[in-house]
Image (cartoon, grey):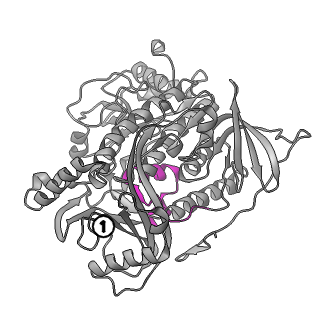
Amino acid sequence: MALERIGPFEYRHYQPSLPQLNRAGDEGQRHPVLIVGGGPVGLATALGLANWGVPSVVIEADDSVCEGSRAACISRRSLEILDRLGTVRAFMQKGLAWTRGRSFYGLDEVLVFDMPSAQGDKFPPMVNLEQYYIEQFLLDSIAKVNAASPGRVDIRWASKVTACTQDNRGATVRVENALGTYDASADWLVACDGGQSLIRSSLGVELKGTGYQGRYAIVDIELDSSHPTERRAWFDPPWARGTTILMHRQPDNIWRVDYQLAAGQDTAQVLEPEQLRQFVQTHLDAIGEGHLRWKPVWTSIYRAGAMTLDSYRHGRILFAGNSAHAMPIFGVRGLNSGFDDSDNLTWKIAAVVNGKGVERLLDSYSAERVQAFHVNAESAMRSTEFMSPPNRGFELMREACLSLAGRHKGIARLVNPRQTHAIAYEKSPLSSAGDPFVTGPGEGAVLVDVQVREGVFLTDLLERHGFTVLGFVSLSAQGEIEAAVASPGWRWLPVQCVVLHAGAEVTQLYGARAGSVYLVRPDGHVCARWHAPSAATVLAAVQLACGAERNLQ
Protein backbone atom coordinates (compact mmCIF):
# COMPACT_ATOMS: atom_id res chain seq x y z
CA MET A 1 0.00 0.00 0.00
CA ALA A 2 1.36 3.42 -0.97
CA LEU A 3 2.42 5.78 1.80
CA GLU A 4 0.21 8.84 2.28
CA ARG A 5 2.52 10.72 4.64
CA ILE A 6 5.79 10.53 6.57
CA GLY A 7 5.78 12.89 9.52
CA PRO A 8 4.39 16.20 8.21
CA PHE A 9 5.22 15.35 4.58
CA GLU A 10 2.06 14.53 2.64
CA TYR A 11 2.33 12.68 -0.65
CA ARG A 12 0.64 14.13 -3.69
CA HIS A 13 -0.53 11.57 -6.23
CA TYR A 14 -0.73 12.47 -9.89
CA GLN A 15 -3.01 10.99 -12.53
CA PRO A 16 -1.77 9.54 -15.83
CA SER A 17 -2.44 11.51 -18.99
CA LEU A 18 -2.31 11.13 -22.74
CA PRO A 19 -0.82 13.75 -25.06
CA GLN A 20 -2.61 14.77 -28.23
CA LEU A 21 -2.26 11.81 -30.60
CA ASN A 22 -2.53 11.51 -34.38
CA ARG A 23 -4.68 8.96 -36.21
CA ALA A 24 -1.94 6.36 -35.90
CA GLY A 25 -2.11 6.71 -32.13
CA ASP A 26 1.25 8.44 -31.82
CA GLU A 27 2.32 11.92 -30.84
CA GLY A 28 2.51 14.21 -33.80
CA GLN A 29 5.00 16.41 -31.98
CA ARG A 30 8.72 15.57 -31.84
CA HIS A 31 10.43 16.78 -28.68
CA PRO A 32 13.94 18.19 -28.26
CA VAL A 33 14.59 16.00 -25.21
CA LEU A 34 12.87 13.03 -23.58
CA ILE A 35 13.87 12.14 -20.03
CA VAL A 36 12.98 8.65 -18.87
CA GLY A 37 12.77 8.61 -15.09
CA GLY A 38 11.47 11.36 -12.79
CA GLY A 39 13.72 10.81 -9.78
CA PRO A 40 16.14 13.48 -8.53
CA VAL A 41 18.54 13.17 -11.48
CA GLY A 42 15.79 13.24 -14.10
CA LEU A 43 14.05 16.20 -12.45
CA ALA A 44 17.33 18.11 -12.03
CA THR A 45 18.06 17.53 -15.73
CA ALA A 46 14.62 18.76 -16.75
CA LEU A 47 14.95 21.84 -14.53
CA GLY A 48 18.44 22.56 -15.82
CA LEU A 49 17.35 22.29 -19.44
CA ALA A 50 14.34 24.50 -18.73
CA ASN A 51 16.63 27.18 -17.31
CA TRP A 52 18.54 27.04 -20.61
CA GLY A 53 15.27 27.43 -22.54
CA VAL A 54 15.15 23.81 -23.70
CA PRO A 55 11.76 22.07 -23.27
CA SER A 56 11.62 18.43 -22.23
CA VAL A 57 9.21 15.61 -21.47
CA VAL A 58 9.74 13.52 -18.32
CA ILE A 59 8.19 10.05 -18.24
CA GLU A 60 7.85 8.64 -14.72
CA ALA A 61 6.45 5.21 -13.84
CA ASP A 62 5.25 6.12 -10.33
CA ASP A 63 2.44 8.51 -9.49
CA SER A 64 4.32 10.44 -6.80
CA VAL A 65 7.73 11.19 -5.35
CA CYS A 66 9.68 8.34 -3.80
CA GLU A 67 9.00 6.66 -0.48
CA GLY A 68 11.61 6.72 2.26
CA SER A 69 14.86 8.55 2.89
CA ARG A 70 16.88 6.73 0.18
CA ALA A 71 19.63 9.15 -0.93
CA ALA A 72 19.51 11.39 2.11
CA CYS A 73 22.90 13.19 2.20
CA ILE A 74 23.57 16.14 -0.11
CA SER A 75 27.19 17.26 -0.54
CA ARG A 76 28.51 20.81 -0.78
CA ARG A 77 29.20 20.24 -4.47
CA SER A 78 25.56 19.19 -5.02
CA LEU A 79 24.37 22.27 -3.14
CA GLU A 80 26.40 24.40 -5.56
CA ILE A 81 24.66 22.61 -8.44
CA LEU A 82 21.25 23.16 -6.85
CA ASP A 83 22.18 26.82 -6.42
CA ARG A 84 22.79 27.10 -10.17
CA LEU A 85 19.41 25.45 -10.73
CA GLY A 86 17.80 28.14 -8.58
CA THR A 87 16.33 25.74 -6.03
CA VAL A 88 18.86 25.53 -3.21
CA ARG A 89 17.04 27.84 -0.78
CA ALA A 90 14.36 25.25 0.03
CA PHE A 91 17.05 22.59 0.56
CA MET A 92 18.94 24.78 3.02
CA GLN A 93 15.80 25.81 4.88
CA LYS A 94 14.61 22.23 5.43
CA GLY A 95 17.84 20.22 5.45
CA LEU A 96 20.06 19.59 8.46
CA ALA A 97 23.69 20.63 7.99
CA TRP A 98 26.44 18.56 9.59
CA THR A 99 30.21 18.38 9.67
CA ARG A 100 31.12 15.74 12.25
CA GLY A 101 31.13 11.96 12.35
CA ARG A 102 31.87 9.48 15.14
CA SER A 103 32.88 5.84 14.95
CA PHE A 104 32.74 3.29 17.78
CA TYR A 105 34.31 -0.13 18.12
CA GLY A 106 32.45 -2.13 20.70
CA LEU A 107 31.78 0.53 23.34
CA ASP A 108 34.85 2.67 22.61
CA GLU A 109 34.90 5.78 20.45
CA VAL A 110 37.80 5.29 18.05
CA LEU A 111 37.37 8.16 15.58
CA VAL A 112 35.94 11.65 15.44
CA PHE A 113 36.25 13.33 12.04
CA ASP A 114 35.28 16.81 10.93
CA MET A 115 34.73 17.66 7.29
CA PRO A 116 36.37 20.90 6.10
CA SER A 117 34.20 23.91 6.91
CA ALA A 118 34.66 27.46 8.09
CA GLN A 119 32.47 30.26 9.32
CA GLY A 120 31.30 32.24 6.33
CA ASP A 121 31.22 29.30 3.90
CA LYS A 122 28.41 29.60 1.39
CA PHE A 123 27.34 26.00 1.98
CA PRO A 124 28.10 23.36 4.61
CA PRO A 125 30.00 20.20 3.62
CA MET A 126 26.88 18.04 3.98
CA VAL A 127 23.12 18.41 4.44
CA ASN A 128 20.75 15.61 5.45
CA LEU A 129 17.40 15.65 3.66
CA GLU A 130 15.10 12.78 2.75
CA GLN A 131 14.82 12.04 -0.95
CA TYR A 132 11.09 12.67 -1.04
CA TYR A 133 11.80 16.28 -0.05
CA ILE A 134 14.60 16.47 -2.63
CA GLU A 135 12.21 15.41 -5.39
CA GLN A 136 9.40 17.63 -4.13
CA PHE A 137 11.59 20.74 -4.02
CA LEU A 138 12.74 20.08 -7.58
CA LEU A 139 9.09 19.69 -8.62
CA ASP A 140 8.23 22.97 -6.90
CA SER A 141 10.95 24.75 -8.89
CA ILE A 142 9.74 23.13 -12.11
CA ALA A 143 6.21 24.37 -11.32
CA LYS A 144 7.57 27.93 -11.05
CA VAL A 145 9.32 27.56 -14.41
CA ASN A 146 6.12 26.26 -16.01
CA ALA A 147 4.14 29.14 -14.51
CA ALA A 148 6.44 31.57 -16.30
CA SER A 149 6.85 29.46 -19.46
CA PRO A 150 3.89 27.05 -19.74
CA GLY A 151 4.80 23.57 -20.95
CA ARG A 152 8.56 24.00 -20.58
CA VAL A 153 8.67 20.74 -18.58
CA ASP A 154 5.96 18.16 -19.30
CA ILE A 155 5.92 15.50 -16.56
CA ARG A 156 3.88 12.42 -17.44
CA TRP A 157 3.18 10.52 -14.25
CA ALA A 158 2.14 6.88 -13.81
CA SER A 159 3.48 6.11 -17.29
CA LYS A 160 5.83 3.28 -18.07
CA VAL A 161 8.30 3.04 -20.94
CA THR A 162 8.11 -0.48 -22.37
CA ALA A 163 10.32 -0.22 -25.48
CA CYS A 164 12.97 2.03 -26.96
CA THR A 165 14.51 2.38 -30.42
CA GLN A 166 16.80 4.95 -32.01
CA ASP A 167 18.19 6.06 -35.35
CA ASN A 168 20.58 8.80 -36.40
CA ARG A 169 17.88 11.45 -35.91
CA GLY A 170 16.75 10.59 -32.40
CA ALA A 171 15.01 8.06 -30.16
CA THR A 172 11.46 6.73 -29.84
CA VAL A 173 9.88 5.12 -26.78
CA ARG A 174 6.65 3.19 -26.33
CA VAL A 175 4.71 4.59 -23.35
CA GLU A 176 1.95 2.75 -21.51
CA ASN A 177 -0.38 3.94 -18.76
CA ALA A 178 -3.91 3.31 -17.54
CA LEU A 179 -5.36 5.47 -20.34
CA GLY A 180 -3.60 3.91 -23.30
CA THR A 181 -0.40 3.34 -25.24
CA TYR A 182 1.50 5.65 -27.57
CA ASP A 183 4.92 6.35 -29.08
CA ALA A 184 6.90 9.47 -28.19
CA SER A 185 9.97 10.66 -30.09
CA ALA A 186 12.76 13.15 -29.40
CA ASP A 187 16.04 14.33 -30.84
CA TRP A 188 17.77 13.26 -27.62
CA LEU A 189 16.87 10.84 -24.85
CA VAL A 190 18.34 11.00 -21.34
CA ALA A 191 17.99 7.72 -19.47
CA CYS A 192 17.55 8.39 -15.75
CA ASP A 193 15.54 5.24 -15.11
CA GLY A 194 17.65 3.79 -12.34
CA GLY A 195 19.49 0.61 -11.58
CA GLN A 196 17.01 -1.60 -13.45
CA SER A 197 17.08 0.67 -16.50
CA LEU A 198 14.84 -0.50 -19.33
CA ILE A 199 16.65 1.85 -21.71
CA ARG A 200 19.94 0.19 -20.85
CA SER A 201 18.43 -3.25 -21.40
CA SER A 202 16.91 -2.22 -24.72
CA LEU A 203 20.40 -1.35 -25.99
CA GLY A 204 21.87 -4.58 -24.67
CA VAL A 205 24.50 -2.80 -22.56
CA GLU A 206 25.41 -3.76 -18.99
CA LEU A 207 27.03 -2.28 -15.93
CA LYS A 208 30.49 -3.67 -15.28
CA GLY A 209 32.45 -3.64 -12.04
CA THR A 210 32.31 -5.07 -8.55
CA GLY A 211 29.21 -6.29 -6.75
CA TYR A 212 29.49 -6.99 -3.03
CA GLN A 213 27.68 -9.72 -1.13
CA GLY A 214 27.19 -7.62 1.99
CA ARG A 215 23.63 -6.42 2.54
CA TYR A 216 22.23 -3.64 4.70
CA ALA A 217 18.74 -3.07 6.03
CA ILE A 218 17.59 0.55 6.04
CA VAL A 219 14.97 1.60 8.59
CA ASP A 220 13.55 5.11 8.83
CA ILE A 221 12.07 5.74 12.25
CA GLU A 222 10.21 8.66 13.75
CA LEU A 223 12.03 9.42 17.01
CA ASP A 224 11.91 12.54 19.18
CA SER A 225 15.63 12.62 19.96
CA SER A 226 17.70 15.71 20.74
CA HIS A 227 21.01 14.16 19.65
CA PRO A 228 22.91 16.51 17.31
CA THR A 229 23.09 16.01 13.56
CA GLU A 230 26.19 13.91 12.93
CA ARG A 231 27.10 10.59 11.37
CA ARG A 232 27.46 7.76 13.91
CA ALA A 233 28.85 4.31 13.12
CA TRP A 234 29.09 1.33 15.50
CA PHE A 235 31.38 -1.56 14.54
CA ASP A 236 30.71 -4.88 16.25
CA PRO A 237 28.68 -3.38 19.12
CA PRO A 238 27.96 -5.72 22.09
CA TRP A 239 24.22 -5.58 21.42
CA ALA A 240 24.63 -6.66 17.76
CA ARG A 241 27.85 -8.66 17.44
CA GLY A 242 29.23 -8.97 13.92
CA THR A 243 27.14 -6.05 12.67
CA THR A 244 27.88 -2.50 11.59
CA ILE A 245 25.22 0.11 12.38
CA LEU A 246 24.95 3.63 10.95
CA MET A 247 22.62 6.34 12.21
CA HIS A 248 21.73 9.72 10.69
CA ARG A 249 19.35 12.42 11.84
CA GLN A 250 16.97 13.84 9.22
CA PRO A 251 14.34 16.59 9.26
CA ASP A 252 11.00 16.10 11.04
CA ASN A 253 12.51 13.84 13.74
CA ILE A 254 13.07 11.10 11.18
CA TRP A 255 16.17 9.02 11.95
CA ARG A 256 17.76 6.65 9.48
CA VAL A 257 19.26 3.43 10.81
CA ASP A 258 21.34 1.23 8.47
CA TYR A 259 22.59 -2.11 9.71
CA GLN A 260 24.51 -4.95 8.15
CA LEU A 261 22.84 -8.32 7.66
CA ALA A 262 24.64 -11.53 8.50
CA ALA A 263 25.60 -13.82 5.63
CA GLY A 264 22.70 -16.12 4.82
CA GLN A 265 20.21 -14.08 6.85
CA ASP A 266 16.78 -14.19 5.21
CA THR A 267 15.76 -10.78 3.83
CA ALA A 268 12.02 -11.30 4.26
CA GLN A 269 12.54 -12.33 7.86
CA VAL A 270 14.68 -9.28 8.58
CA LEU A 271 11.92 -6.98 7.32
CA GLU A 272 9.20 -8.57 9.46
CA PRO A 273 7.79 -5.86 11.75
CA GLU A 274 8.61 -7.68 14.98
CA GLN A 275 12.20 -8.40 13.89
CA LEU A 276 12.71 -4.74 13.00
CA ARG A 277 11.13 -3.58 16.24
CA GLN A 278 13.37 -5.80 18.34
CA PHE A 279 16.55 -4.74 16.55
CA VAL A 280 15.82 -1.01 16.67
CA GLN A 281 14.62 -1.09 20.30
CA THR A 282 17.73 -2.99 21.38
CA HIS A 283 19.90 -0.43 19.59
CA LEU A 284 18.07 2.53 21.13
CA ASP A 285 18.32 0.96 24.58
CA ALA A 286 22.08 0.56 24.12
CA ILE A 287 22.68 4.21 23.12
CA GLY A 288 20.52 5.59 25.93
CA GLU A 289 17.41 6.48 23.94
CA GLY A 290 15.29 3.39 24.52
CA HIS A 291 12.89 5.36 26.71
CA LEU A 292 11.84 7.56 23.79
CA ARG A 293 8.74 6.74 21.78
CA TRP A 294 9.41 5.75 18.21
CA LYS A 295 7.78 4.10 15.21
CA PRO A 296 9.07 2.74 11.88
CA VAL A 297 8.00 4.65 8.77
CA TRP A 298 9.91 2.96 5.92
CA THR A 299 12.22 0.00 5.36
CA SER A 300 14.36 -1.34 2.55
CA ILE A 301 17.32 -3.62 1.77
CA TYR A 302 20.50 -2.46 0.09
CA ARG A 303 23.40 -4.33 -1.52
CA ALA A 304 26.62 -2.47 -2.32
CA GLY A 305 28.14 -2.32 -5.79
CA ALA A 306 30.58 -0.19 -7.79
CA MET A 307 29.69 -0.66 -11.45
CA THR A 308 29.49 1.46 -14.59
CA LEU A 309 28.72 1.47 -18.27
CA ASP A 310 31.78 1.72 -20.51
CA SER A 311 30.23 4.76 -22.16
CA TYR A 312 27.40 7.08 -21.09
CA ARG A 313 26.58 8.03 -24.68
CA HIS A 314 25.09 5.58 -27.14
CA GLY A 315 24.09 7.48 -30.27
CA ARG A 316 21.17 9.73 -29.39
CA ILE A 317 20.77 8.19 -25.92
CA LEU A 318 22.66 9.46 -22.88
CA PHE A 319 22.73 7.76 -19.48
CA ALA A 320 22.84 9.55 -16.13
CA GLY A 321 22.56 8.59 -12.47
CA ASN A 322 21.96 4.98 -11.50
CA SER A 323 21.19 3.95 -15.07
CA ALA A 324 24.83 4.83 -15.89
CA HIS A 325 26.55 3.62 -12.73
CA ALA A 326 26.03 2.09 -9.30
CA MET A 327 27.81 3.45 -6.23
CA PRO A 328 27.93 2.10 -2.67
CA ILE A 329 26.13 4.26 -0.12
CA PHE A 330 29.29 4.65 1.96
CA GLY A 331 30.66 8.12 1.35
CA VAL A 332 27.29 9.26 -0.11
CA ARG A 333 28.42 9.20 -3.75
CA GLY A 334 25.23 7.83 -5.30
CA LEU A 335 22.84 10.74 -5.77
CA ASN A 336 25.67 13.26 -5.50
CA SER A 337 27.32 11.61 -8.52
CA GLY A 338 23.97 11.73 -10.27
CA PHE A 339 23.65 15.47 -9.68
CA ASP A 340 27.15 15.89 -11.13
CA ASP A 341 26.10 13.84 -14.17
CA SER A 342 23.11 16.11 -14.69
CA ASP A 343 25.13 19.29 -14.19
CA ASN A 344 27.76 18.15 -16.69
CA LEU A 345 25.23 16.98 -19.27
CA THR A 346 22.62 19.73 -19.13
CA TRP A 347 24.68 22.61 -20.48
CA LYS A 348 26.11 20.43 -23.23
CA ILE A 349 22.70 19.22 -24.46
CA ALA A 350 21.45 22.81 -24.31
CA ALA A 351 24.42 24.04 -26.34
CA VAL A 352 23.81 21.39 -29.02
CA VAL A 353 20.01 21.84 -29.14
CA ASN A 354 20.34 25.63 -29.29
CA GLY A 355 23.00 25.48 -32.00
CA LYS A 356 25.69 26.94 -29.74
CA GLY A 357 27.86 23.83 -29.61
CA VAL A 358 28.64 20.84 -31.82
CA GLU A 359 27.51 17.28 -31.24
CA ARG A 360 30.94 15.95 -30.24
CA LEU A 361 30.49 18.03 -27.07
CA LEU A 362 28.28 15.20 -25.82
CA ASP A 363 31.16 12.73 -26.15
CA SER A 364 33.00 14.79 -23.54
CA TYR A 365 30.11 14.17 -21.12
CA SER A 366 30.82 10.46 -21.23
CA ALA A 367 34.60 10.85 -21.10
CA GLU A 368 34.49 13.16 -18.08
CA ARG A 369 31.85 11.35 -16.08
CA VAL A 370 33.26 7.86 -16.67
CA GLN A 371 36.60 9.17 -15.39
CA ALA A 372 34.80 10.67 -12.39
CA PHE A 373 33.17 7.30 -11.70
CA HIS A 374 36.54 5.57 -11.45
CA VAL A 375 37.87 8.24 -9.07
CA ASN A 376 34.74 7.96 -6.92
CA ALA A 377 34.71 4.17 -7.08
CA GLU A 378 38.28 3.88 -5.81
CA SER A 379 37.34 5.62 -2.55
CA ALA A 380 33.89 4.06 -2.39
CA MET A 381 35.25 0.52 -2.73
CA ARG A 382 37.77 1.09 0.05
CA SER A 383 34.99 2.35 2.30
CA THR A 384 32.74 -0.57 1.35
CA GLU A 385 35.43 -3.15 2.02
CA PHE A 386 35.89 -1.62 5.46
CA MET A 387 32.19 -1.20 6.25
CA SER A 388 31.16 -4.56 4.80
CA PRO A 389 34.25 -6.85 4.57
CA PRO A 390 33.94 -9.23 1.58
CA ASN A 391 35.95 -12.03 3.23
CA ARG A 392 37.68 -13.11 6.42
CA GLY A 393 40.95 -11.46 5.39
CA PHE A 394 39.29 -8.04 5.22
CA GLU A 395 37.52 -8.76 8.51
CA LEU A 396 40.84 -9.42 10.24
CA MET A 397 42.34 -6.23 8.81
CA ARG A 398 39.34 -4.22 9.98
CA GLU A 399 39.44 -5.73 13.45
CA ALA A 400 43.13 -4.86 13.74
CA CYS A 401 42.55 -1.27 12.61
CA LEU A 402 39.60 -0.74 14.92
CA SER A 403 41.37 -2.25 17.94
CA LEU A 404 44.32 0.11 17.46
CA ALA A 405 42.48 3.21 16.23
CA GLY A 406 41.66 4.56 19.68
CA ARG A 407 45.36 4.79 20.58
CA HIS A 408 46.93 5.59 17.21
CA LYS A 409 45.63 8.56 15.21
CA GLY A 410 47.43 7.41 12.06
CA ILE A 411 45.54 4.14 12.11
CA ALA A 412 42.30 5.91 13.01
CA ARG A 413 42.42 7.65 9.63
CA LEU A 414 41.76 4.25 8.02
CA VAL A 415 38.34 4.26 9.69
CA ASN A 416 37.42 7.55 7.98
CA PRO A 417 34.49 6.94 5.57
CA ARG A 418 36.06 9.06 2.79
CA GLN A 419 33.10 11.31 2.07
CA THR A 420 32.40 12.42 -1.49
CA HIS A 421 34.27 15.40 -2.93
CA ALA A 422 34.31 17.37 -6.17
CA ILE A 423 36.13 15.55 -9.00
CA ALA A 424 38.60 17.23 -11.36
CA TYR A 425 38.26 16.21 -15.01
CA GLU A 426 41.87 15.42 -15.72
CA LYS A 427 42.81 15.43 -19.41
CA SER A 428 39.35 16.70 -20.36
CA PRO A 429 38.97 17.16 -24.14
CA LEU A 430 37.42 20.55 -23.34
CA SER A 431 40.47 21.94 -21.51
CA SER A 432 43.15 24.09 -23.12
CA ALA A 433 46.81 24.33 -22.23
CA GLY A 434 47.59 27.35 -20.10
CA ASP A 435 50.40 28.88 -18.09
CA PRO A 436 52.06 27.45 -14.95
CA PHE A 437 50.42 28.45 -11.65
CA VAL A 438 51.89 27.81 -8.21
CA THR A 439 48.50 27.00 -6.70
CA GLY A 440 44.76 27.21 -7.39
CA PRO A 441 42.34 24.92 -9.28
CA GLY A 442 43.91 23.56 -12.46
CA GLU A 443 42.36 22.65 -15.79
CA GLY A 444 39.31 20.42 -15.23
CA ALA A 445 39.03 21.19 -11.51
CA VAL A 446 36.02 22.79 -9.84
CA LEU A 447 36.36 26.48 -9.06
CA VAL A 448 37.04 27.00 -5.35
CA ASP A 449 34.22 29.12 -3.94
CA VAL A 450 35.23 31.95 -1.60
CA GLN A 451 33.62 35.07 -0.25
CA VAL A 452 34.95 38.01 -2.28
CA ARG A 453 33.09 40.71 -0.38
CA GLU A 454 30.41 40.88 2.27
CA GLY A 455 27.60 38.53 1.31
CA VAL A 456 28.98 37.87 -2.20
CA PHE A 457 30.72 34.67 -3.22
CA LEU A 458 32.81 33.96 -6.27
CA THR A 459 30.18 31.60 -7.68
CA ASP A 460 27.62 34.44 -7.50
CA LEU A 461 29.64 36.28 -10.16
CA LEU A 462 29.67 33.47 -12.71
CA GLU A 463 27.64 33.37 -15.92
CA ARG A 464 25.11 30.55 -15.44
CA HIS A 465 24.28 30.14 -19.12
CA GLY A 466 27.69 30.50 -20.67
CA PHE A 467 31.39 30.85 -19.91
CA THR A 468 33.00 33.25 -17.47
CA VAL A 469 36.33 34.92 -18.15
CA LEU A 470 37.52 35.72 -14.64
CA GLY A 471 40.27 38.34 -14.53
CA PHE A 472 42.19 39.20 -11.40
CA VAL A 473 42.57 42.99 -10.87
CA SER A 474 42.60 43.65 -14.62
CA LEU A 475 41.55 42.05 -17.90
CA SER A 476 43.37 43.68 -20.79
CA ALA A 477 41.59 41.58 -23.44
CA GLN A 478 38.09 42.34 -22.15
CA GLY A 479 37.12 44.76 -24.90
CA GLU A 480 38.21 42.44 -27.70
CA ILE A 481 36.51 39.43 -26.09
CA GLU A 482 33.21 41.23 -25.59
CA ALA A 483 33.26 42.62 -29.13
CA ALA A 484 33.91 39.20 -30.63
CA VAL A 485 31.14 37.52 -28.60
CA ALA A 486 28.66 40.28 -29.50
CA SER A 487 29.40 40.04 -33.23
CA PRO A 488 26.96 38.28 -35.62
CA GLY A 489 29.63 35.72 -36.48
CA TRP A 490 29.88 34.33 -32.94
CA ARG A 491 28.09 30.95 -32.98
CA TRP A 492 29.10 29.58 -29.59
CA LEU A 493 27.78 29.91 -26.05
CA PRO A 494 27.76 33.37 -24.43
CA VAL A 495 30.85 34.65 -22.61
CA GLN A 496 30.84 37.04 -19.69
CA CYS A 497 33.93 38.92 -18.51
CA VAL A 498 34.30 39.52 -14.77
CA VAL A 499 37.14 41.53 -13.24
CA LEU A 500 37.73 40.46 -9.67
CA HIS A 501 39.07 42.94 -7.13
CA ALA A 502 39.59 40.67 -4.16
CA GLY A 503 41.98 40.62 -1.26
CA ALA A 504 45.42 39.07 -1.18
CA GLU A 505 44.06 35.89 0.41
CA VAL A 506 41.83 35.11 -2.58
CA THR A 507 44.50 36.05 -5.08
CA GLN A 508 47.01 33.77 -3.35
CA LEU A 509 44.47 30.94 -3.17
CA TYR A 510 44.25 31.07 -6.96
CA GLY A 511 47.97 31.56 -7.52
CA ALA A 512 47.05 34.70 -9.42
CA ARG A 513 48.63 38.08 -10.03
CA ALA A 514 47.36 41.22 -11.73
CA GLY A 515 46.20 40.19 -15.21
CA SER A 516 45.79 36.46 -14.46
CA VAL A 517 42.71 34.88 -16.05
CA TYR A 518 40.61 31.79 -15.35
CA LEU A 519 38.17 30.53 -17.98
CA VAL A 520 35.23 28.82 -16.24
CA ARG A 521 32.63 26.51 -17.80
CA PRO A 522 28.87 26.75 -17.09
CA ASP A 523 29.22 23.85 -14.62
CA GLY A 524 31.92 25.61 -12.61
CA HIS A 525 34.90 23.62 -13.90
CA VAL A 526 38.04 25.41 -15.05
CA CYS A 527 38.75 25.22 -18.81
CA ALA A 528 42.10 26.98 -18.74
CA ARG A 529 44.12 29.62 -16.88
CA TRP A 530 46.77 32.02 -18.03
CA HIS A 531 48.76 35.07 -17.03
CA ALA A 532 47.75 37.98 -19.32
CA PRO A 533 46.35 35.97 -22.30
CA SER A 534 45.34 37.50 -25.62
CA ALA A 535 41.70 37.67 -26.67
CA ALA A 536 42.42 35.15 -29.43
CA THR A 537 43.75 32.65 -26.89
CA VAL A 538 40.71 32.96 -24.65
CA LEU A 539 38.19 32.78 -27.51
CA ALA A 540 39.90 29.73 -29.00
CA ALA A 541 39.61 27.99 -25.61
CA VAL A 542 35.88 28.82 -25.48
CA GLN A 543 35.36 27.34 -28.94
CA LEU A 544 37.21 24.18 -27.96
CA ALA A 545 35.03 23.87 -24.85
CA CYS A 546 31.96 24.11 -27.11
CA GLY A 547 33.13 21.08 -29.05
CA ALA A 548 35.14 22.70 -31.85
CA GLU A 549 38.14 20.91 -33.33
CA ARG A 550 41.46 21.84 -31.79
CA ASN A 551 42.82 22.95 -35.18
CA LEU A 552 40.25 25.76 -35.22
CA GLN A 553 42.18 27.51 -32.47
Point out residue 334 in the picture as x, y percentages from the top left corner.
43, 49
Point out residue 161 in the picture as x, y percentages from the top left corner.
70, 45
Residue closer to the observer: 428 or 498: 428
Point out residue 128 in the picture as x, y percentages from the top left corner.
40, 63
- Magenta span: 65-94
Query: Which residue is painted at 80% across and 39% down in the image?
Result: 29
Residue closer to the observer: 328 or 337: 328
Residue closer to the observer: 62 or 17: 62
- The quadrant of the rendering that contains the N terminus is bottom right
- Splitting the image into 4 quarters, where does residue 73 fall? bottom left
The reply, left or right, for residue 22 in relation to residue 306 is right
Query: Which residue is painted at 54% across and 53% down in the image?
Result: 40
- Is any atom of residue 44 visible in this view? yes
The reply, left or right, for residue 128 in relation to residue 227 is right
Residue that badge 1 annotates: 230
The three-letter code of the residue at mark 1 reads Glu
Q: Is residue 529 magenta?
A: no
